[in-house]
Amino acid sequence: MHTYSFEKLEVWQLARAFRKSIYLLTATFPKEETFGLISQIKRSVSSIGACLAEGSGKITMKDKAHYINMAYTTTLETLNHLIAALDLDYISEQDYLTSRSKIEIITTKLSALRKSQLP
C-alpha cells in the first residue's frame, strides 16, 4: 500500500491522534450540544489533518504553505472551542490543559513546517 507524503509528517500524525482524543472527549458533552459545540469542535479538529493532506498535493511551495497556515488557524479554532467547553464546565481543567499542551506542540510544528516551505 502506498504511503502519501502527508502521512509521513509528524505533525499530521500528532493531529490524527489529537482528533481521536477530542472525539473521545466530546462524547462526554451534553447531548443538547450535538449540533452546536460538539459539531464545531469536531469539524475544526478534523480540518487540521485535512488541510495538511490537501496541501501536500499542491505543486508550489507557496500553495503548500497556505494550507499549512490553514491547518494552524483551525488548530487555534479548536483551542477556542475547548476554552468554551471549559467555561461551560463540559471539560475539566485537566482535560483542557492536556489538550492545550497538544495544541502547543502541533502549532509549533506547523509553524516550523510553514517556514520550511517559504523561501
Image (cartoon, rainbow, N blue to C red):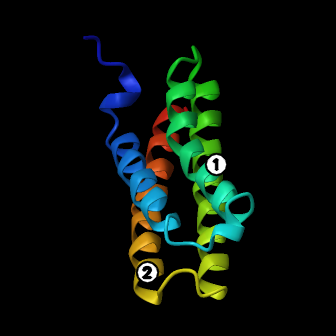
108 to 50, vertically: above or below: below
Where disc 2 sits, the SS reads helix
Give residue 97's mark.
2
Q: Give the x, y percent position of residue 36.
A: 74, 62
Q: Which residue is most to the left? A: 1
Q: Is residue 108 visible?
A: no
67 to 19, vertically: above or below: above
Q: Give the x, y percent position of residue 28.
A: 50, 71
Residue depicted at x 42% and y 48%: 15
Which residue is more in the foreground, 9 or 45?
A: 45
Give residue 22's mark.
none
Q: Give the x, y percent position of residue 100.
A: 47, 73
Badge 2 crowding class, 10 Å Cα cut-off, few under 14, some 14 to 19, many 20 or more, is few
Q: Give the x, y percent position of residue 18.
A: 41, 55
Residue depicted at x 57% and y 56%: 75
Quadrant showing the C terminus: top right
Report how far apart the C-alphas of labels 2 and 1 lie in the structure.
Answer: 21 Å
37 to 59, vertically: above or below: below
Q: Earlier in the sequence, mark 2 or mark 1?
A: 1
Q: Is residue 78 left or right of residue 101?
A: right
The image quadrant that residue 47 belongs to is top right
> Which amino acid does the dot numbered 1 rest on?
Arg
Give residue 43's mark.
1
Which residue is more in the foreground, 63 or 100?
A: 100
> Which amino acid does the dot numbered 2 rest on?
Leu
Where disc 1 sits, the SS reads helix
Cβ atoms at labels 2 and 1 below 8 Å apart: no
108 to 88, vertically: above or below: above
Residue depicted at x 52% and y 41%: 114
Q: Is residue 69 visible?
A: yes
